[in-house]
Image: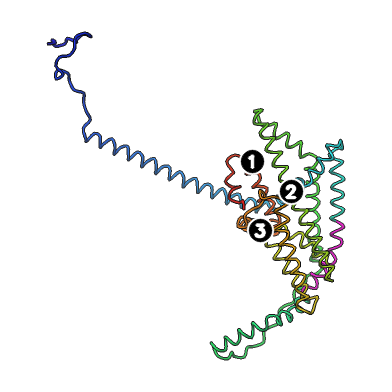
Amino acid sequence: MNEPGHLPSHDEPVRDRSDVAPLPVDSDESIGYASSAHSRGLQTTRGTLRHLRAIRVILNSMLLLALMYTVTLTKSLLIPLVLAAFLGLALNPIVAAGSRRGLPRWLCASVLMLALVGSLGFGVSKVAQPAMGWIQGAPATMKELLPKFRTITAPFEMANRATQNLVNGPPSRAHPAAAAAAVSISTWDVLAKAPAVLAAMLTVTLLVFFFLVFGDTLLRRLVEIVPDFHAKRHAVVIVRSIQTEVSRYILTTSLINLSLGLFTAGMLWWLNMPDPLLWGTVAMMANYIPYVGAITTTTILMMVGLVHFDQLGQAMLPALCFIGFTIVEGNLITPMVLGRRMRVSPIAILLWLLIWGWLWGIPGALLAVPMLTSVKLIAERIRGWGWFAVMVQR
């Protein structure tokens, strides 16, 4: 038996296990206290995370509202910049092709811009006078159009009156309505806006020229800022791919819209419609706004046909032919040329049109879909933004 204070040696086993003092064991109260403290700590952590998420949502919402206000406030500056950037991306492959053949970029850009400005001036000179005639004659045209609409809607009005007589009895004699005030747009009203329009066109022209000449230099300087060589190489690949895909989309869409405008003008000329070049230009520009543009052009052609022709079938033929053109273009030609990768969801298009039409008006509606498609292509190449491309893809 071991003496007090004597430790057994390595070779001397302990004979009586009861002589060894037992280790202290936690009681049930201490275990319950520890678990409750742990649960309270978890609840505190979860509550803090919920508060942080709520603060983050509030800050993101405030940032979004601030951005929307800034975009609306600076639209006179941003609209020319965005338009010039899209035109520069669309025309850059032509300048790059000339540069690869040894021609200076400034020479290719100058020749291209002179040809573009000359073509645009020629087209405006051809459609400006007919457009002014239709604007000035709009009140008379509406007066001429109303009786024809009454002949179309007469059966529906008679059925409506018969239903009201059966439900409410014969109507009392109404006082004659006052004549609507004539709406007139003078030439001076149009000329008053000419300086601002010319200044905006000159700004866009200069910006496109400088983008074409110095765009590649600017991109190289931006890549040089990246410190790591691997990151520089990755940035060059991303920038070049985005530039190629966005320029391909804009140039292809512009050629498709131009072809639609030419086909529409030819169809209207063949049907003896007045001012076919004007309505072809309207169809080309409106086709940049999906769905809404086609509906607007169809409505305009239907109204012009009702004014110009006496027979209803002949009057509706231009609008029906244009509907056929847009069906073929939207469901066959555009998907086949652009491919499935650049197709965007109709819901995303309509929401984007509403947002940018509200912020920038008609220019925002014209630029909305090119901006949405470009942002989608960029989001596919940037890490962490793939969710946006998936959300807006058709």
Disc 3 marks which amino acid? Gly
- Where disc 2 sits, the SS reads helix
Give the answer, above or below, for where 267 lies relative to 5: below
Residue 239 point in image, percent of width and height: 69, 38
Type of amino acid at the residue the image marks with label 1: Arg
Q: Are marks 1 and 2 in contact (CB under 8 Å)?
A: no
Mark nearer the viewer, 1 or 3: 1
Query: Disc 1 versus disc 3: distance between alpha carbons?
Result: 27 Å
Q: Nearer the viewer, residue 47 or 337?
A: 337
Q: Which residues are magenta?
A: 121-138
The answer to whether the residues at label 1 and label 3 have Cβ atoms under 8 Å apart is no
Residue that badge 2 annotates: 86
Q: Which residue is mark 3?
A: 357
Task: Tell me if residue 250 comes above or below residue 168 in the rendering.
Answer: above
Vertically, is 44 above or below 250? Answer: above
Q: Main secondary structure of the magenta part?
A: helix
| Other residues around mark 1 within 10 Å, as few (<14) / some (14–19) / many (≥20) | some
**Marks 2 and 3, how far apart at CA:** 18 Å
Q: Residue at x 67, y 61 (%)?
A: 291
Q: CA distance from mark 1 to mark 2?
A: 19 Å
Determine the secondary structure under disc 1: helix
| Residue 87 image offset from top left, x and y in percent | 76, 48
The mark nearer the N terminus, 2 or 3, is 2
- Badge 2 amino acid: Phe
Mark 3 surroundings within 10 Å by alpha-carbon count, few (fewer than 14), some (14 through 19), many (20 or more): some
Q: Which residue appears at 71% of the width and 46% of the height?
A: 246
Direction from residue 266 to residue 372 in the image, left or right: left
Q: Nearer the viewer, mark 2 or mark 3?
A: 2
Label 1 or label 2, whichever lies nearer to me, is 1
Q: Is residue 185 left or right of residue 353?
A: right
Element type at mark 3: helix
In the image, residue 345 lies at what x, y percent?
62, 55
